[in-house]
Image (tube, helix red, strand yellow):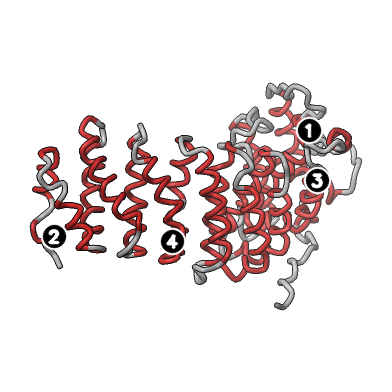
Amino acid sequence: MSSPPPSPEMSPRKLLSIPRHLILRLADQIRETLARTSYAPPAGSPVSVKSLLESLLPLAEVSKPIIREIIDFCLCCAALASAVGVESPSVYWIPKELSSLARSALWEISAAESFAAEHEMVAELMSEVLPELKAAVKQTIVDPDDEMFINASSRAPVASAIVAAHQFRWLVTQVVYPHLGNMCALVMPCALTTMDHWSPEVKEQGMITLIHLGKNVNAAELGWYEEAFLDVCCRNIAASDDLWSRTVEVSTLLLTCTQRKNPRSTWFELILSEMLGHLERQPFNQNRRVAWLQLIGPVFNAMGLVLLMHFHRIFPLFFQWLHSDDDETILLVLERIHEILKLTWVRKSPQLDRLFDMLILLYKEVGMRRSRDSIRNSILETLILLQKCNVSLFKTSWSKLKDDPCLDMLVSLLSSEVLEAH
């Protein structure tokens, strides 16, 4: 394989021409609002995030190179803007007013320097700052169980890495297809570094960034780093309960983007097996199973017939979840079962007999549930599809239950044409 495409030009041409008086005026507005904002550092934290952000704002007296002032100011704005819709402990204290002010400042800079669009300014800024944001995160990539962790944290507090991760995520998500593809050589190494971090806050920002990449970069551009991305996704599946939904989303997206044409790829086996193993250890965790059932569909579609190899692990989980207390889980399981049957058109499997029995039992049990009509309609659709997959099995199983008075409604819904089809 040839080498990956080169990084974009690193010279911050237009950023250099931003008038200093403009930066100072915008910085004064943000400094005043930031000073009024209440902030209490987390217990035990050696670093005040508020103080860290204030230190990025330029002062009237020149204390560093102009380009450094411009870059630091933009990074401060990126950190403040990143707080919108985020519950991270490090930035949740930033009010919408301050985030909006920071975003407006960046827009004003972009307009003043005649950038074609705001994403052009952000792209130029990224070429300058992503290497240092990556370095800030990498400083604290230390195993928290390691005896050296405390010393490393005092040298480079994790709050600095968390702020850098928020800045990185916000900057990348301002650039969309097709412009983001040209920046892959810069963005992808930094994204991998955030995913390798031990802090859930840093990891989450990396996952959000990778999800944005997967939606705004084509498969060929992702291909230069696909092995590294899929490996880090696989290793993060069991990282944190709080990140489970993000992990499944990013793994599903990157897996299908890069391996769609190869359903027998070992990555499907590895990642699906990791997910199933985690679900098997906590089968009654409602949030975990609902998130997985909602997000796993594209992987099933990409794998197709290869799913047959995983029936012995998938269906036992489905059968447990069909007895769940929440209707959402049951409806999602029925949706995934219907999807799998359509994809595999399975004619012979030890799971089919049990599946038929479970569907009939569920039909009889859901009479008092709020979503009983939706559940029963889904069961009916699945039974019809099951009959088409295996007529003889369906007839044999149905003959044992057709006289059950609890199933009169189901019998009336299943037409004789379907039941007697050959």
Mark nearer the N terminus (3 vs 4): 3
Quarter occupied by residue 403: top left
Front residue of this view, candidates 219 and 115: 219
What is the C-alpha distance between the residues marked 2 and 1?
A: 71 Å
Mark nearer the N terminus (2 vs 1): 1
Disc marking residue 136: 3
Front residue of this view, candidates 210 and 99: 210
Mark 2 nearby-residue class (10 Å; few <14, some 14–19, many ≥20): some
Front residue of this view, candidates 12 and 75: 75
Instruction: Please tell me which residue is depicted at 14% across the width and 42% down the height of the picture.
Output: 407
- The residue carrying mark 1 is 54
What is the C-alpha distance between the residues marked 3 and 1?
A: 18 Å
Q: In the image, 35: left or right of 251?
A: right
Under mark 2, the amino acid is: Val
Q: In the image, 60: left or right of 314?
A: right
Select label 3 or label 1 by which is in front. Answer: 3
Disc marking residue 307: 4
Secondary structure category for the residue under label 1: helix
Quarter occupied by residue 34: top right
Mark nearer the N terminus (2 vs 4): 4
Select label 2 or label 1 by which is in front. Answer: 2
Front residue of this view, candidates 153 and 123: 153
Secondary structure category for the residue under label 2: helix
Mark nearer the N terminus (4 vs 1): 1
Instruction: Please tell me which residue is depicted at 24% across the width and 63% down the height of the picture.
Output: 390
What is the C-alpha distance between the residues marked 3 and 2?
A: 64 Å
Instruction: Please tell me which residue is depicted at 47% across the width and 46% down the height of the picture.
Output: 292
Q: Residue furthest right?
A: 63
What is the C-alpha distance between the residues marked 2 and 4?
A: 27 Å
Mark nearer the N terminus (3 vs 2): 3
From the image, which quarter does the C terminus lie in? bottom left
Q: Are marks 2 and 1 in contact (CB under 8 Å)?
A: no
